[in-house]
Image (cartoon, helix red, strand yellow):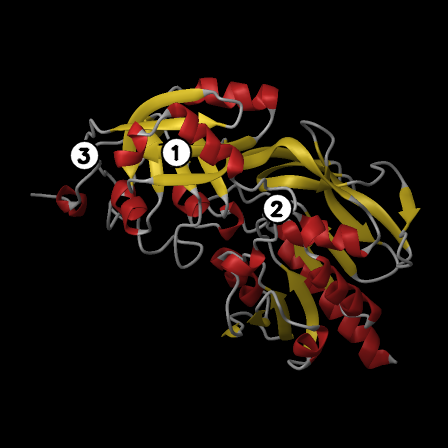
């Protein structure tokens, strides 16, 4: 008797060479994995032990060459139920040991085949621990993976291509990953009303969680104006996660200020947290090597509870961690609600005088953990309370 995965090919052991080149000239020679050719992007590491399918299909990773710190990748294959978007978005993929077999009953194809299908150039068989330690010391940097015929390019030419690639700082990438027209996910819980979601790179799990809280979820393109948002008669507005530098998203910050001026409740996650910070008048900055993975400890200052959370961010908001402060843009008092325990980075903001808050991480957290899922309930409660106040006036 055979299992369903007996018919799914794993990774063919490739003897084709590939090389990872970092912008400081560091080189790591390995084996070709996924599609062949050249890819360029910011090299970052993700620390999750599982959930690589969700990482690969998270639009927040656009423009990034992702290194998995877990040494053995691909044994559960890829399935049709867990994708967070319509395709794989990473610019490239780095693993140490690519699984030669697929051994999960939910799998419909192999990771290797999925990478090749979506044109994602990868590399396997290198010392990923050494690369991670180097990035931890030197910081995230541009890199390139060269395989197939491009693996034979002169080292000087490979490095030239890497250093000619754009840096992540200053890039606005949301247009690459956003929907082109409005899409609607109907409420699956007791209906509250229409929710406007500005798609900066939203994950499907986020939409499912919002629909489960009673929102008819209207996913709007990242170029939408406040008039576009108002046209759906929303009870609240949500800004999603997404890739790129928040300092390069002035248009979305301007729209968010119109949302806050109109008194609409607001919830933002990840990129939406950074843009909320900017709308409040705060600055943002690039982290040395960022937070990526599903095991990041965060303190909820209101409860004193430590949550293990899923992250993918290379930028953060500048704000005083202790006490409250006045919004430089005139939106009343604000406080930092959540703090990262590894490095004291701001991981959440809460406006005290308007119905608006945000977090820097993923409360939907597919593929886990689920410590922060309560934030969707908190958002629902904020919206319901806001509507009750309006009805009472």
Q: Which of the two labelled residues, at mark 1 and mark 2, occupies the earlier sequence position?
A: 1
Q: Residues within 10 Å of mark 3 (few under 14, many from 20)?
A: few
Q: CA distance from mark 2 to mark 3?
A: 39 Å
Q: Residues within 10 Å of mark 1 (few under 14, many from 20)?
A: many
> Which mark is on residue 12?
3
Give the residue number, with chain letter if any, for mark 1: 145
In screen coordinates, is 230 left or right of 107?
right
* Residue name at image x 77 percent, y 48 percent: 349
- Describe the element under mark 1 as helix, strand or loop: strand
* Residue name at image x 72 percent, y 34 percent: 345
* Residue name at image x 80 percent, y 62 percent: 355
The answer to whether the residues at label 1 and label 3 have Cβ atoms under 8 Å apart is no
Tell me where residue 84 appears, x and y as whole percent.
Answer: 44, 54
Any part of residue 48 in sight: no
Tell me where residue 242 appears, x and y as whole percent.
Answer: 58, 52
In screen coordinates, is 263 left or right of 125?
right
Q: CA distance from mark 1 to mark 2?
A: 35 Å
């Amino acid at each position: 008797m055979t299992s369903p995965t007996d018919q799914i090919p794993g990774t063919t052991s490739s003897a084709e060479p590939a090389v990872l080149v970092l912008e400081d000239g560091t080189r790591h020679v390995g084996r070709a994995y996924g599609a062949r050719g050249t890819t360029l992007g910011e090299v970052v590491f993700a620390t999750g032990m599982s959930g690589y399918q969700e990482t690969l299909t998270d639009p927040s990773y656009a423009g990034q060459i992702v290194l998995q710190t877990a040494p053995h990748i691909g044994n559960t294959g890829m399935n049709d139920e867990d994708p967070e978007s319509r395709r794989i978005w990473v610019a490239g993929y780095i693993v140490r040991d690519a699984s030669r077999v697929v051994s999960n009953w939910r799998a419909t194809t192999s990771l290797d085949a999925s990478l090749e299908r979506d044109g994602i150039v990868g590399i396997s068989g290198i010392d990923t621990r050494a690369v991670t330690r180097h990035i931890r010391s030197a910081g995230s940097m541009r890199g390139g993976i060269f395989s197939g015929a491009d693996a034979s390019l002169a080292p000087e030419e490979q490095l030239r291509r890497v250093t000619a690639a754009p840096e992540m700082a200053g890039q606005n990438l949301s247009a690459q990953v956003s929907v082109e027209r409005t899409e609607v996910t109907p409420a699956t819980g007791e209906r509250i009303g229409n929710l406007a979601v500005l798609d900066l790179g939203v994950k499907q799990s986020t939409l499912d969680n919002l629909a489960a809280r009673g929102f008819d979820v209207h996913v709007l393109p990242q170029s939408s104006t406040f008039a576009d948002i108002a046209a759906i008669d929303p009870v609240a507005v949500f800004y999603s996660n997404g890739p790129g530098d928040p300092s390069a998203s002035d248009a979305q910050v301007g729209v968010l200020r119109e949302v806050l001026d109109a008194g609409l409740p607001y919830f933002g996650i990840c990129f939406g947290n950074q843009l909320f910070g900017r709308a409040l008048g705060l600055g943002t900055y690039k982290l040395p090597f960022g937070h990526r993975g599903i095991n990041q400890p965060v303190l909820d200052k209101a409860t004193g509870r430590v949550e293990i959370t899923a992250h993918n961010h290379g930028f953060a908001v500048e704000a005083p961690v202790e006490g409250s402060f006045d919004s430089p843009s005139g939106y009343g008092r604000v406080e930092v609600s959540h703090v990262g325990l590894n490095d004291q980075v701001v991981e959440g903001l809460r406006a005290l005088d308007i119905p608006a808050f945000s977090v820097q991480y993923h409360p939907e957290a597919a593929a886990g953990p689920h410590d922060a899922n309560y934030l969707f309930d908190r958002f629902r409660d904020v919206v319901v309370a806001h509507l009750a106040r309006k009805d009472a006036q």
